[in-house]
Amino acid sequence: MSQESRSEYSEGDLRKTGMALKHERTWDYELDRIVEAVEERGAEKVGLQFPEGLKRRAPHVADDLRELLPEDTRVLISGQPCYGACDLDTYMMRRTDVFVHFGHSPMKESDKIIYVPLFSNVEVEPIMEESLDELSDPEEDPHVGLVTTAQHMNKFEEMKAWLDERGYEVHTRRGDDRLTHEGQVLGCNYASADIDADQVLYVGGGKFHPLGLAMEHPEKNVVIADPVNNVVTIADTEKFLKQRYGAVHRAMDAETWGVVFCTKIGQGRWDVANDIVENNENAYLLTMDEVTPDRLTQFGFDAYVNTGCPRITTDDGPQFKQPMLTPGEYQIAVGEEPLDSLSFDTFHGTW
C-alpha cells in the first residue's frame, strides 16, 4: 500500500482508514504447537507466512522457533504479499513439510497448514460502552446483530454476554463455509450479518468491513465500535458509492475490456471470468497472481473487470489509471443491469 498521507487520497478511497493503532497489541504465535507439528512429522523445512502488517515480526518469530527446533531444521519466510486466509503461498507450501499461516482463521481445512489466528489483546468493553449512544434503547428495540473479525473472536462470547446483561437480544450466526466462526465477517463476506435485527454492532478495527456490511445490508444501521482506535462511528456508504458510481460511468464508453482472473488459491472465480469473455468479443482474459495498476497499464485496455478479491477493486480502485470494476459493476457499464442495481462484491462458499 502507498505511504501517502490520508489527505492525498481521493474521496471514497478506503486505504489506510482506521489502521493507526491507539493501543499496543501483543500476539501469541503458538510456537509450542508449531514445534509439536515439526516433531510429529519429522519436518526438515518449516514455512512461515505473515500478513502485510506483521511481516516485520517474521525474523523475530523465526529466531524464536530456531531456538526451539533441532539445528538441522530450516525455517523459511514467505515474501509473497498476503491479505487473508485465501492468499496462501502455494509455492512455499509445496516445498516445506510444515506450513504456518499467521493472522487469519482457517478458510480451508488442511493437515498441511497450521493456522495461527493471532487474537488481539485489546479490551472491547470500554468501546462497547460508548457504542450504546448509537444503539437503540433496549426497551424500545432490543434486537441487535453482533459481528467482528478473526482478531477479536477471542472476545466474542464476552461481547454477547455484555450486550445481554444490558437488555439486548443478541442475534448471531456463522454465515457460510467461507467463515470459521459464529459472528465472523471477512472483507469479502458478510453472511454472518443475515440476521433478524435492524441494527448491527461491528466490533473491530478499520472501516472496510463495516462499510461492506452496510453496502450488502443497506436496510440495517451499522454501528462501528473500534477498540483499536477507540472511536465509535456509523457506517456511511455515501463517499464509497460516489467513487464506485464514478468508476462505472467512466467505463461506459470502454471499447476493450481486460478481465482479470486471480490465480491466488482462494480468490479465483473462473466461471465468472469466462462468462464475461464468452459474451463480449472485445473482452480478454488476463491471469495473474498480484493485481497492480502497473501490471494492468501495460495492456492498454479501456477498462478492467476484477473477478478476484473484491478489495482489489474497492481498496486500490483510485490507483488504477483505467476504471476497475467488479463483475456486477461491469454488467451495469455494458447495459445488462440498471444503475441502481449497484451492490457490494462478495465471495461466498469455499474454493
Image (cartoon, rainbow, N blue to C red):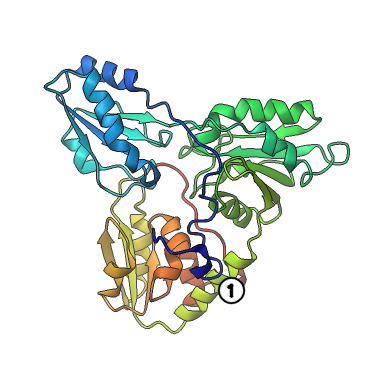
Viewer-closest of 115 and 330: 115
Viewer-closest of 105 and 333: 105
Q: Residue furthest left?
A: 72
Numbered label tally: 1
Q: Is residue 225 left or right of residue 329?
A: right
Is 201 rendered above or below residue 345?
above
Is 176 rendered above or below residue 206?
above
User: Residue at the spot x=28%, y=16% of the render?
Assistant: 36
Amino acid type, residue under disc 1 in the picture: Leu
Q: In the rendered image, which quarter contains the C terminus?
A: top left
User: Residue at the spot x=23%, y=15% of the render?
Assistant: 40
Q: Residues within 10 Å of mark 1 (few under 14, many from 20)?
A: some
Residue 82, x across and y down, in percent? 34, 46
Residue 193, by quadrant, is top right
User: Residue at the spot x=77%, y=41% of the render?
Assistant: 132
Residue 138, x across and y down, in percent? 83, 37
Is 112 rendered above or below residue 23?
above
Viewer-closest of 64 and 205: 64
Residue 172, x across and y down, in percent? 64, 34
| Residue that mark 1 sits on | 339
Residue 211, by quadrant, is bottom right
Residue 163 seen: yes
Q: Is residue 36 left or right of residue 226?
A: left
Residue 224 seen: no
Q: In the rendered image, which quarter contains the N terminus?
A: bottom left
Q: Is residue 181 left or right of residue 70?
A: right
Q: Secondary structure at mark 1?
A: helix
Viewer-closest of 57 and 344: 57
